């Protein structure tokens, strides 16, 4: 049986750590989310549509997490529960654009108009040809939406792998998991600070940066051992 030298073992282990323990590996795929309440503001020509925030609980948590709806054509109801897959925004242009738009509405001190325009911008971005959306779009919003969409598109094109939104994710529903109604909507937001009400993020692996330093350190140690063997 072949024996592996210490430096070889350390090198393999370190390389594996650097590959596997990257930031994207820190996500649990699925979680149960429940719509508990909305922010209260609504707008629309034909009927009032609730705009950001939609307040959710995750896996039965008592804390509420605000998310923005980004699919207009489906409907959800208070108390509706379903399983969603959480996807990071970085690396996907349309998700980066959705995060950019959300960031305008979620900014401290954002006006009611800014929030509403951002909400309708994301709806229009993901469902641009929905006749119900076009009929219900509030008068005067379109120029502001066009400006915001252009800004978001320019940012996304040039920053598809951005790290500007490390805590914002996309929540894609798994069809058939809802407890009532039709196919749930897609949402974007930050679930981490209030998950389970304790400020801990159960989706994230330990600090990726720490693992990278750990892996780098092992590689360095392996190199040192190899160097000593060579000059011995």
Image (cartoon, helix red, strand yellow):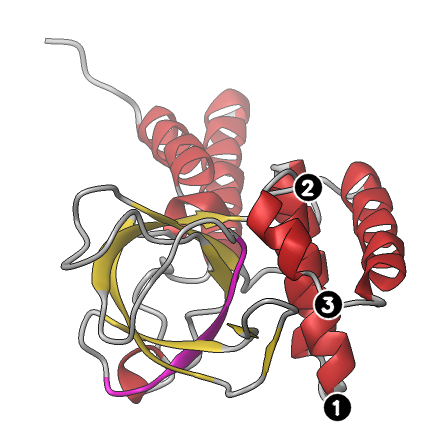
Taking the view exactly as shown, the residue that stands out farthest to the left is: 1
Q: Residues within 10 Å of mark 1 (few under 14, many from 20)?
A: few
The magenta region covers 62-70
Between 90 and 67, the one nearer to me in the picture: 67
- Label 1: which residue? 109
How many angstroms separate mark 3 from mark 1 (CA)? Answer: 22 Å
Between 21 and 24, the one nearer to me in the picture: 24
Look at the image and tell me whether residue 99 can be seen. Answer: no
- Label 2: which residue? 161
Q: Residue at x 31, y 29 (%)?
A: 9
Give me the disc on residue 78.
none
Taking the view exactly as shown, the residue that stands out farthest to the top is: 1
User: Quarter of the image holding residue 12?
Assistant: top left
Residue 63 lies in the magenta stretch: yes
First in sequence: mark 3 vs mark 1: 1
How many angstroms separate mark 1 from mark 2 (CA)? Answer: 28 Å
Q: Nearer the viewer, mark 1 or mark 2?
A: 1
Q: Residue at x 24, y 87 (%)?
A: 62
Residue 182 lies in the magenta stretch: no
Q: Nearer the viewer, mark 3 or mark 1?
A: 3
First in sequence: mark 3 vs mark 2: 3
Q: Position of residue 10 (x, y in %)?
A: 36, 34
How many angstroms separate mark 3 from mark 2 (CA)? Answer: 33 Å
Asked if 106 appears above or below 173 in the picture, the reply is below
- SS label for mark 3: loop
- SS label for mark 1: loop
The answer to whether marks 3 and 2 mark residues whose Cβ atoms lie closer than 8 Å is no
First in sequence: mark 1 vs mark 2: 1
Q: Position of residue 125 (x, y in %)?
A: 67, 46
Residue 190 placement, left or right of 94: left
- Label 3: which residue? 138
Which image quarter is the N terminus in? top left
């Amino acid at each position: 049986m072949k024996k592996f030298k210490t430096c070889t073992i350390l090198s393999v282990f370190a390389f594996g750590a650097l590959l596997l323990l990257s930031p994207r590996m820190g996500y649990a795929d699925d979680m149960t989310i429940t719509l508990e309440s909305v922010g209260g503001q609504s707008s629309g020509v034909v009927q009032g549509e609730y705009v950001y925030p939609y307040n959710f609980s995750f896996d039965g948590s008592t804390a509420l997490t605000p998310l923005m709806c980004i699919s207009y054509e489906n409907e959800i109801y208070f108390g509706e529960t379903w399983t969603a897959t959480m996807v990071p925004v970085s690396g996907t242009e349309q998700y980066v654009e959705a995060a950019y738009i959300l960031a305008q509405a979620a900014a401290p001190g954002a006006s009611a108009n800014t929030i509403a325009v951002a909400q309708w911008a994301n709806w229009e971005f993901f469902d641009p040809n929905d006749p119900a959306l076009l009929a219900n779009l509030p008068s005067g919003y379109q120029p502001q939406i066009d400006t915001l969409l252009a800004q978001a598109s320019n940012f996304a094109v040039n920053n598809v792998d951005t790290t500007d939104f490390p805590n914002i994710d996309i929540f894609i529903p798994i069809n058939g998991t809802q407890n009532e109604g039709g196919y749930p909507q897609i949402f974007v937001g930050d679930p981490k600070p209030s998950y389970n009400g304790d400020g801990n993020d159960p989706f994230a692996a330990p600090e990726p940066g720490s693992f990278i330093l750990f892996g780098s350190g092992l590689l360095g140690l392996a190199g040192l051992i190899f160097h000593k063997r060579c000059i011995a």
